[in-house]
Image (cartoon, grey):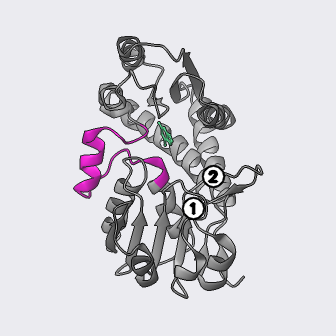
Amino acid sequence: MTARLIDGKAIAQALREDIRTQVSALRAQGRRAPGLAVILVGADAASQIYVRHKHQACEAAGMHSVVHLMSADSTQEQVLAAVHALNQDDTIDGILVQLPVPAQISGKAVIDAIAVAKDVDGFNPENLGLLAQRTPRLRPCTPYGVIKMLEHEKIDVRGMDAVVIGQSNIVGRPMALELLMKSCTVTICHSQTKDLPGHVARADLIVAGIGKPEFVRGEWIKPGAVVIDVGLNRLESGKIVGDVAFKVAAERAAYITPVPGGVGPMTIAMLMQNTLEAYQHRTRT
Ligand code: GUN
């Protein structure tokens, strides 16, 4: 392997420690702790793990954390009522509805109902619109975390040909906006893209967020490229792999993120950061 590993776990740890110190300073001044509420509808196994990690991260940071577990057959009205109640709750600065939600509920309706000032996922049209206009407020956590990793490694991405693989609202689209704001030349590839290997072969920076194990072949990677792997896939053997075939990619890339221990921990750290930012904005500190 010749690539330098970007240690997301360590970068996230340092960020979370910094946030913990800031929260503890607020508490020492007699202020209330920032609060995050997470709504989980149903019992999807992966979502349960993500929500547990978010709750634990809040507690470790000294934040107030509320988890609302709602049954899989909850109606849209019930979920909207839970969101509206949290919008009114002054002890809550951030609200997050874990996605995906069951089929009878519109994810968009639920996200749109979250108060813009508490939208710590940054998925609300206003927050995404602000990012598109280069004046971001609350930014989607995973792309924001990728930017923090690049900054931490002092990788100057200006002018780079960046290829984002995946066009989801959670990763691909906001990632492209973040990279455009960093003056990359951005291409978004997706399932209908003709010649994905050709696009990847030309890329100085690749961000893969498609959710397909080792879909991006290592041989496609341009020597010296920066490879950011957002994928987290569990094989039947139980092994966790990313969206990029790591071994060969790491022989060609200049930088690469491991899976696990790369982008994943950054997402949680940025959620803590967004919750603190929402608190500061709401309490004007
Ligand atoms: N499901 C997968 N990733 C995310 C995320 O970042 N936020 C929410 N709310 N749901 C998700």
Would you name the residue on which mark 2 appears? 233
Residue name at image x 57 percent, y 62 percent:
243
Q: Residue 136's x, y, as percent?
A: 31, 51
From where the camera sits, is residue 106 visible?
yes
> Magenta span has 166?
no
Dot 1 crowding, Cα within 10 Å, few <14, some 14–19, many 20+: many
Answer whether residue 260 is visible to the viewer in this image: no
Mark 1–mark 2 CB contact (< 8 Å)? yes
SS state under label 1:
loop
Q: Is residue 137 magenta?
A: yes
Which element is circle 2 on?
A: strand
Say what amino acid the circle numbered 1 marks. Asp
Between 255 and 89, which is closer to the camera in this rendering? 255
Q: Is mark 1 within 8 Å of ligand 1?
A: no
Q: Which residue is mark 1?
A: 243
**Residue plotted at (69% across, 85% down):** 2
The residue drawn where x is 41% and y is 73% is: 196
Q: Could you tell me how far apart the alpha carbons at marks 1 and 2 are, in whole angstroms? A: 7 Å
Residue 259 horizontal/vertical position (percent): 66, 60
| Magenta residue span | 120-142
- The answer to whether residue 61 is above or below residue 172 is above
Label 1 vs 2, first from the N-terminus = 2
